[in-house]
Image (cartoon, rainbow, N blue to C red):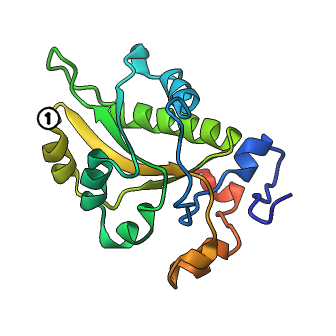
């Protein structure tokens, strides 16, 4: 068992217990052409309200113009480490459908798709780290995203690197024990 494996209060799937969000990514690792097909297929099959599937993605591999466009929108804290990942992905919610109707569950549904993707990625030996620190308007402008679509988060995908490559205090956070609030604290009511 890895020291990063979650210490759960009840048994969970190994992939869930072992999944974590590193900031140290292997800058020499590249993804072959179809390496992410399975992770996006997992996202495709996530549940959604009325099967609307209101999620879209921008996938950019390190070294490409699109990668640079996304990296330029990252907050300084995230920019300090995210560029070493093999890919950056912008997670986008279709908040209004083509007919102009609001899709109030779009962000929730996108979250489920990204969760499925991150679990599949971990099962395939890849690591994912999701970020909210980026300029949404700059992403929309850089990629000409229609206003009915809203960029929600950015994630990095790649192979695990060494914590030693990170500056402090990121290095310290990378190796710190994982923690979560207690299970009982998650409930407002519980019968």
Q: Please tell me which residue lies in front, 11 or 118.
A: 118
Name the element at disc 1.
loop
Against 22, residue 45 (above or below) is above
Residue 32 rendering spot, x and y as whole percentages = 54, 37
Residue 90 rendering spot, x and y as whole percentages = 35, 44
Disc 1 designates what residue?
A: 147
| Residue 174 picture quarter | bottom right
Residue 87 rendering spot, x and y as whole percentages = 44, 48
Name the residue located 19 percent from the left edge and 40 percent from the top edge.
143
Name the residue located 15 percent from the left edge and 14 percent from the top edge.
99
Residue 9 rendering spot, x and y as whole percentages = 81, 54
- The answer to whether residue 164 is left or right of residue 2 is left
Q: Does residue 106 appear in the picture of this structure?
A: yes
- The answer to whether residue 47 is left or right of residue 133 is right
Q: Please tell me which residue lies in front, 8 or 165.
A: 165
Against 142, residue 37 (above or below) is above
Q: Please tell me which residue lies in front, 87 or 7.
A: 87
Question: Quick one: quadrant of the C terminus?
Answer: top right
| Residue 145 picture quarter | top left
Name the residue located 13 percent from the left edge and 45 percent from the top edge.
141
Against 6, residue 34 (above or below) is above
């Amino acid at each position: 068992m890895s020291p990063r494996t979650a210490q759960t209060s009840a048994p969970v799937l190994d992939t869930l217990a072992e999944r974590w969000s590193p900031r140290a990514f292997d800058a020499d690792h590249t993804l072959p052409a179809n390496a992410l097909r399975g992770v996006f297929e997992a996202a495709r099959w996530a549940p959604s309200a009325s099967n609307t599937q209101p999620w879209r993605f921008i996938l950019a591999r390190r070294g490409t113009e699109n990668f640079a466009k996304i990296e330029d929108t990252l907050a300084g804290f995230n920019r300090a480490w995210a560029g070493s990942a093999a890919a950056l992905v912008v997670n986008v919610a279709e908040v209004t459908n083509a007919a102009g109707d609001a899709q109030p569950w779009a962000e929730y549904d996108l979250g489920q798709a990204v969760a499925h993707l991150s679990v599949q990625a971990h099962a395939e030996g890849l690591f994912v780290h999701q970020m909210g620190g980026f300029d949404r308007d700059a992403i929309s402008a850089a990629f000409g995203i229609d206003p009915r679509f809203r960029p929600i988060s950015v994630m990095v995908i790649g192979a695990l690197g060494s914590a030693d490559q990170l500056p402090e205090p990121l290095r310290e956070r990378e190796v710190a024990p994982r923690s979560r609030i207690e299970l009982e604290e998650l409930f407002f009511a519980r019968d």
